[in-house]
């Protein structure tokens, strides 16, 4: 029985992944989260309250858990933990860390570096510049403003004037170099799960049209789109992720997919990917390559999330 250690234990995607893996009966699941009341802790075999990724003792703590629990697979699901997690490979050579290449992750976690990479690789991208650049004086509004580094749609707003940009910088106490101003694309938003193994083989691509979103996706539906699938393969071919990632894009009214973010990890919509027939977790854990071409999935499958209450005894110190 393999032991899998995942972080982000309070996330909806992590909880669903845990439920799915435990049903198989062939994995022991360990979860970690900074929140001692994270809901995922009620669905796992064991849990640990983690320090912040910025804490000097973060890697030491993770290493202790890996050693104590004899972890076979480590899956970091919190952006701030990702780059630090690569150092674990030297400490545990046999540990499978489900992440893309470090170069790819470092690039896409910085949204401005991602845009520059898309431009260099001749891949369509939204007009984007830093708030510190002089060209912002010619802003044609509305525009999207967001942190250069961030997740979960935090501090992502629409502005309609130069004054609103200044107000944004003041409100969130952010320097102009740390804020992106981006073209507000018109069309349908998609999150796309892309399963790539260490050898660079694209095993599956599952586009999911976003129906409702509040930070994380509330409802979505799988869609078969050749243009989006081809774009995912192009990203792998040109940027060499060599590991799982997800893309966020707009399919414009002209039918052109335009990437605005890439995340070097599994998506929070992993439950929908699995329900549609693509087991993107064990596909990489067990090195399961589809017999021919990409793994197939069910198109037109809708996911709708809802809140559920959990009740458990308070833990005494």
Image (cartoon, rainbow, N blue to C red):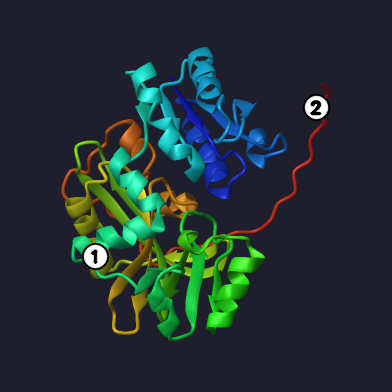
Give the quarter of the image for residue 57. top right
Residue 198 placement, left or right of 187: left
Give x and y (percent) for residue 199: 19, 37
Q: Secondary structure at mark 2?
A: loop
Instruction: Name the quadrant of the C terminus.
Output: top right
Give x and y (percent) for residue 173: 62, 60
Please tell me whether residue 213 is drawn above or below residue 127 in the rendered image.
above
Query: Mark 2 or mark 1, which is nearer the start of the sequence?
Result: 1
Give x and y (percent) for residue 213: 56, 66
Residue of label 2: 315
Q: Secondary structure at mark 1?
A: helix
The disc placed on residue 119 is 1
Residue 194 placement, left or right of 121: right
Is residue 29 in view from this perspective? no
Q: Nearer the viewer, mark 1 or mark 2?
A: 1
Who's the residue at 28% across and 54% down the image? 296
């Amino acid at each position: 029985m393999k032991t899998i250690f995942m972080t982000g234990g309070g996330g909806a995607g992590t909880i669903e992944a845990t439920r799915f893996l435990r049903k198989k009966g062939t994995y022991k699941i360990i979860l970690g989260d900074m929140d001692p009341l994270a809901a995922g802790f009620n669905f796992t075999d064991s849990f640990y309250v983690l320090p912040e990724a910025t804490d000097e003792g973060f890697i030491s703590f993770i290493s202790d858990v890996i050693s104590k629990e004899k972890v076979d697979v480590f899956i970091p699901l919190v952006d701030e933990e990702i780059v630090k997690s690569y150092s674990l490979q030297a400490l545990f050579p046999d540990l499978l860390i489900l992440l893309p290449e470090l170069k790819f992750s470092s690039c896409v976690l910085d949204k401005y570096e991602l845009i520059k990479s898309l431009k260099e690789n001749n891949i369509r991208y939204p007009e984007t510049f830093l708030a510190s650049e002089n060209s912002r004086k010619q802003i044609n509004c509305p525009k999207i403003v967001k942190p250069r580094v961030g997740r979960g749609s935090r501090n992502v707003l629409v502005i309609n004037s130069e004054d609103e940009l200044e107000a944004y910088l003041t409100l969130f106490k952010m320097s102009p170099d740390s804020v992106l101003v981006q073209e507000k694309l018109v069309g349908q938003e998609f999150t796309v799960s892309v399963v790539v193994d260490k050898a660079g083989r694209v095993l599956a691509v599952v586009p999911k049209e976003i129906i409702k979103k509040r930070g994380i996706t509330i409802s979505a539906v799988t869609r078969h789109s050749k243009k989006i699938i081809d774009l995912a393969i192009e990203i792998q071919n040109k940027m060499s992720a060599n590991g799982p990632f997800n893309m966020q894009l707009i399919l414009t009214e002209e039918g052109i997919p335009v990437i605005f973010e890439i995340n070097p990890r599994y998506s929070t919509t992993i439950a929908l990917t699995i329900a549609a027939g693509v087991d993107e977790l064990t596909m990489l854990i067990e090195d399961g390559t589809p017999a021919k071409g990409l793994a197939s999935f069910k198109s037109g499958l809708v996911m709708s999330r809802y809140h559920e209450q959990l009740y458990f005894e308070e833990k005494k110190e």
